[in-house]
Every structure is written in C-alpha cells, then in structure tokens.
Amino acid sequence: MLFACQTKCEGCKFIRALRSIFKSVENLRVLDLGTGSCETLKLMLKMGMNATGVESAAFSLEDNCPELLHSGMAIKSKLDGLPFGNSTFDIVFVSHVLEYVPKDSLDGVIAEISRVTKFHVLVTMQTPDGKKKRKGKLVKGLEVESYYSNVWWRERLAASGLDLMDIETHLFLEHARKKNIKLDSQEVAMVLGKVPPEDSRDFPLIHKMYCLACDYMPLVSYMYSPPVTVSQSGRKKKLTMGYTMVLGPSSCNVMRGLLETPPSTLKRAVAFQPAQYTIARDCPDLSRQRLVRPMLPMNTSLPLKSSQADLVLSLFHLELMTEKEIKIHLEELKRVASYRILFLIHTCGLDFEHQDCLANAIPGIMTSRPRKWWSALLEAQGFQTEDMGHALQKRQCRTEQGGATSRMGYCDSVLEELSAGSTYELKVQDIFPVTLKGSHAGGEDIGEMIDQHKGKENGVEEDDETFVYRSSRTTLTSILLSMR
C-alpha cells in the first residue's frame, strides 16, 4: 500500500492514551490494521498489549519487522479479507489507513473491521477543513485515495455498523491532551462502537428511551433512606441502602443520580446494564471506574459475594427476559442479596393487553404479565412482600378548617406527591418491595450497618473496584431536584 513507505509513526502518539482508557480490560487484544513499518505494533507489544499487526504490503513487513512477520505477530493479508474470526479483538486500531484505501474497496475494509472487533474501533485520519470532498490531494507527500470530511466518514462508518461514541471520543482526546499529544490541524480521532445485530437481544435496547426508572428514584430513596424512623406493626424500623446493586437498562442514568445526590444511608453502589453499546454511549466514564458494568450472560454469576448487597434494585429489568431466564436470574439475586430487593416491573395493572399499556410499547420486553402473575412468581421463588406504607400509603396530616382551626386528616402519599411532578405517572402496581423469606432483616440499626461497612473498608475482603463514598443526609427536595 502507498502508506507503507512512510517513515514517521503516525499512530504511535495515540497508543499511550489508548492504553489508559482501556486499562480496565485484562489482556487487551488489539489489531493494528495497516501496521506498515510495525512501529505502532512494536510500541503496543512493549506496553504489554496482546497485539497483532496486519499489512497488505509484504515488502514493508519483510524490510521493517521480519522477526514479527516470522513469529506471526505481523501478518500479510488483504484488508478486505482479514484472516481472523468474528469478534476476535477488543479494539481495532486504524491510524491513517482508510484515507489510502481505494474508494471501491473501502466498504469491504470497513465491514471487515466491524466483523473482527468485539466492540471498539479507534480511527485516526486526515480530513479536509471544509465539508466538500477533495480527491487526489497530497498528505505529507502521499496521494490520498479517499479524502473526505469528518461528517462523510462518520456516515460511511455508520453504514457498516460502526457508530461514533461521542463521550468515549471526548475521554480519549482528553487523555491525549493530558499526555501532551497534539493532533495536526486536519487530523481527527474517533472512538467507534459496533452496533448489535438487528436480530440480537441487545438491538432493541440501543434506542434512547426516556429514563422512567429515574422518575422512581426519589421514591426509592425515600423508601429505603427515609428522613425519619419508620413505624411498622407496632415496632420501629430503620431502613438503610448500605451496599446497593442496581440492575436494568437505565443503570447509567440511575448511577449518575446516585452520585450527584447520594441518599444519606447509601455507602456503596455498583450497577449492571444490558447492551455494552449503551454503556459505551451513555456512561463510559462510569464504566472505566467499574461503577457500571455490562450485564453478564444468564448462566454467569454476578461478581458479588453471597449476601453482599444490602439492597438490590431491579429496575424494569425482569421483563426483558423469558420466564425461564427470570427464574434463573431470581435465584442469583437471592444469592447476592442479604435481605431486601425492590423490583420495578411494567405490569399495566390487570389490563396488560390494553393498547395503552406502556409495557407493550417498550422495545425489548419479552414477558408482559399483570401484577397478579408477577406477585405469584416472586412468592413461589422465595420472596415476601415488605410493607412500605410510609412511602406508598396516604399520610396523616393537619388540614385547615375554616381558615382558623385544623384537624388531623390524610394527605397524599409520598408516591402521589412525587408522581404529580413526574413526566409519567408513578404506578403502585409496578412497585414490588420484597424481602427474602427466612432471612434476617438488615435494617434494625443504622449505626451497626455503618460500622459493618467501615469494618469492610478497613480490612475485610471486598470488591475494591466498587465505588465507595460517605454521604451526608439529603432532603426529599434535593433528591427531587437532582434525580427528576
């Protein structure tokens, strides 16, 4: 290829930034597409990456890196017919290559890039300043075959299932800036993500949806971190969120809300979200901190110890599974939960087949059933309903009589109060607060719970990648403002 004669390592300056943002990936496997003189490949190997280079010009490999060619770390191959299986590499690095691919071969090369990556692609290239394409121009002495605008490239890559990840691109460029890496005036860098196949379970979830779970979070905070001691069945009950695990398609947004306004009794939080595409698009920063992680396959255990989570929040997640998968998943939740679980489930009350039922309009839902069905399933799986009357039932309050006197009456419940200010109605029939049958309540004394967590932080084995913070008491008003 024409670029094989370049002497300067165009992509080397990006490698340290690449390693920084993917440092959480163990044994990072990288493909250096169009490795040329192998300088970028050598740097990757020096930094401990599991890297392979591919180049269409055999003479470049023979002249510049015969030892890598003979060892199989550098491979001669056509770029539109790569000798690798599907989803072989964690990331494909394409630095100043696509500009030199003939236009009639371009779609084939991009399709191969999309095929062999698990998800990520990092592309750097030269583009013109304006939006008009320019052909036959010289870039540092080399004739460019495909010299088009940034917008043109984004559309061409998206046509092959590679979407621009805006936040990840920003994070990458920010890492580069901190390492004093400067892009040339016409140079661009893009972090791309592979769109799930249209027939996959993840594909319906990639469409941006309103975060209904976020509307419920002020209520959840009040349920498990109330500003007062709750009385129930003649005894006082103190509730705590402690170590909370969040599961659902809106985990990115929910975790951001918890970080911005942490409930007073929340000590630790970790979240799992289906569809890696949505995590890379919506919260790659939280993913790098291991605060939000991809949902694991159904037959894989969650990376938590038994009874580790004081509270599990399953937020509109169960209905994305088949009935068989739901039962398997519930067994895993029983393993990791110490006592309390809250399920939010689209039920549509008793009339779940009605055309106005929200559950029937949400992409990805596989199990749409009425509340009675879900209640019976949860009970059969070993869960029992927990009384949350302090949040879900009407409250006693004083009401004015004639403008002068007052008497005890009933005001809206916290649920009704929050629902009035929500975009969508918060429905009590979609809320399932449960506990594990036969388990000991974990909320008798907040002080003991906090001491236990302090002990864990000071020496007891714990998941050290999970976010830890101390929070001050927050009011219902502040929760409303930050999470709505």
Image (cartoon, rainbow, N blue to C red):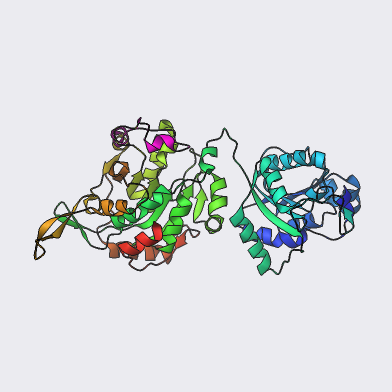
Q: How many marks?
A: 0
Is 159 colored magenta in this rendering? no
Quadrant of the rendered structure where residue 129 is?
bottom right
Closer to the camera in the image, 55 or 407: 407
As displayed, is residue 471 above or below residue 122?
A: below
At a point 73% along the width and 40% down the height, the residue shown is 112
Q: Which is more toward the observer, 162 or 18? A: 162
On the image, the x and y values in percent for residue 326 come to 41, 36
Task: State which quadrant residue 470 falls in.
Answer: bottom left
**Residue 413 as seen in the image, left or right of residue 151:** left
> Is residue 239 visible in this depiction of the protein?
yes
Q: Going by the picture, which residue comes out furthest to the top?
A: 353
In the image, residue 345 above or below residue 214 = above
Of 461 and 304, nearer the camera is 304
Image quadrant where one finds the C terminus: bottom left
Residue 217 lies, in percent from the top left, at 36, 54
Q: Position of residue 49 (x, y in %)?
A: 70, 54
User: Is 56 placed left or right of 338 in the picture?
Assistant: right
Percent across and percent down for residue 72 are 80, 45
Question: Does residue 191 lie above or below 17 as drawn?
Answer: above
- Any magenta on residue 363? yes
The residue shown at (33%, 62%) is 265
Looking at the image, which residue is at 83% across and 48% down? 100
Give the magenta part as a residue range.
353-376
Q: Nearer the viewer, residue 217 or 92?
A: 217
Residue lying farthest front? 402
Inspect this view and state whether residue 22 appears: no
